[in-house]
Amino acid sequence: MSTKTVTDSKSAVIEHRDQLIASFAKGEKPQDRWRIGTEHEKFVYRTRDHRAPSYDEPGGIRDLLMALTEFGWTPVMEGGNVIALTGADGSVSLEPAGQLELSGAPLDNLHLTCAETGRHLEQVLKVAERFDIGFLGLGMWPDKTRAELPIMPKGRYAIMLRHMPRVGSMGLDMMLRTCTIQVNLDYSSEADMVKKFRVGLALQPLATALFANSPFTEGRPNGMLSYRSHIWSDTDPARTGMLPFVFEDGFGYERYADYALDVPMYFVYRDGNYIDAAGLSFRDFLKGELSVLPGELPTIDDWNDHLSTAFPEVRLKSFLEMRGADGGPWNRICALPALWVGLLYDQAALDSAWDLVKGWDMAARETLRSSVPRLALDAPLPGGGRLRDIAGEVLDIAHAGLAARARLDAGGSNETGFLDPLREIVRSGRVPAQILLDRYHDAWNESVAPIYDEMRF
């Protein structure tokens, strides 16, 4: 989730609806300025007993963050607590139960992305040795109950934790017990955004399947391959899902702004504090009628904060976020941006991907999305067959897109090698969660404890 970085500047007051739409148009960039922003989360645990450390215990999350400042990171403070770090490689921040996230800098190519991830992991592993800490690459805690997990001292999380049970049964699980990998990508125009959004939504279930990595809940198989993805089905229907309107004629910036205006608010940030506005209307805010700030109009910063509180499978800000993947080990962190950059950053690849999915109707897309958490590559494909039937073709399209980009490393290799972990999944026909389940029933003797050794960074 987003972390607020306090600045001395104040953004413009929103006086016209056009300003909302312009916030998306300002994200347009020529192709030579398109960048890749990769985010990944990981669980933090004590190596001696697998417990999730609290924020303020000795050697806990606060000490972990402060130790990372030795590598040049600058603390971000809230209420006297360090809740994030900023630096040349983006930002390091906390999820609600102490999951550690790297939100990487916008970079030109996947070689730089993977190097950035490697630097981050090298840094956190050096600190981990000092504090008896390990990091786990999964989509969901394999054994922890909600009650066993600490809460981080971030104002927006306190508001969300109160609000989530009002609107769904699994929102607290989403906040406390899951981790993801996602990638943020640019667009050149409204039309380019629309096509990328549609391809991203239609094929997001394939990303979910390929990265499915959360088959355990509280120490036992949960019947799903991506329980993290299943959690979104009952988190908050007002701000999640496949967004059918994206596929309708006339979709663009204005229609997404209308959707975002209808997403209930969580908060307003003022003078270093989060004001609880959960369930209130941003439309009322635009009229100066927000009950918690009567007479006050929102700013562009308020709008950008609000956009970060919608959680569809693909999200629009001033860039597009691909949000469907479970957390995983190091090599799959680099594979996710490789998939989406290959599909969306080359015009021929984008056109081919759209040709593959444009005939799907919304009912079939929804069926595919709802089936993937349980079935992964065996989920029913629109028009017949199973998702696995197109997985290789999609990877071929992504491969061609990456080859056409011709971004080479110092050794002369292009970016296509970052797809190799996904190629292996498609070749074997088995997603990561299925391999974990095999280990659970065989070598692990129906215990998830060995996962802390086998899936740690």
Image (cartoon, rainbow, N blue to C red):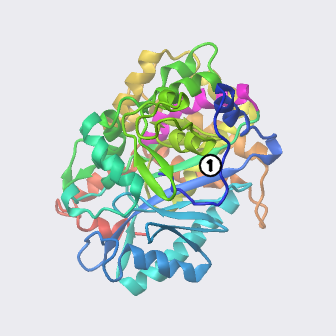
Q: Is residue 170 visible?
A: no
Q: Is residue 430 visible?
A: yes
Residue 336 versus residue 412 in the image, above or below:
above
Kindly identify the residue that appears in the image at 21 percent across and 49 percent down.
221
Give the side of residue 149 with respect to residue 195, left or right: left
Residue 282 horizontal/vertical position (percent): 49, 32
Q: Which residue is mark 1?
A: 338
Q: Residue furthest front?
A: 295
Q: How many numbered marks does the figure carry? A: 1
- Label 1 element class: helix
What's the magenta region? 189-209
Mark 1: which amino acid? Ala
* Image quadrant in which you'd find residue 147: bottom left
Residue 262 horizontal/vertical position (percent): 47, 26
For the stretch drawn in magenta, the main secondary structure is helix
Residue 264 versus residue 355 in the image, above or below:
below
Q: Nearer the viewer, residue 426 or 74?
A: 74
Give the side of residue 46 with respect to residue 69, left or right: left
Q: Residue furthest bottom?
A: 130
Mark 1 crowd level (few <14, some 14–19, many ≥20, 10 Å Cα): many
Residue 42 horizontal/vertical position (percent): 42, 62
Q: Nearer the viewer, residue 153 or 289?
A: 289
Residue 437 versus residue 207 in the image, above or below:
below
Q: Nearer the viewer, residue 237 or 284?
A: 284
**Is residue 106 highlighted in magenta?**
no
Give the side of residue 384 with respect to residue 110, left or right: left
Residue 343 horizontal/vertical position (percent): 65, 37
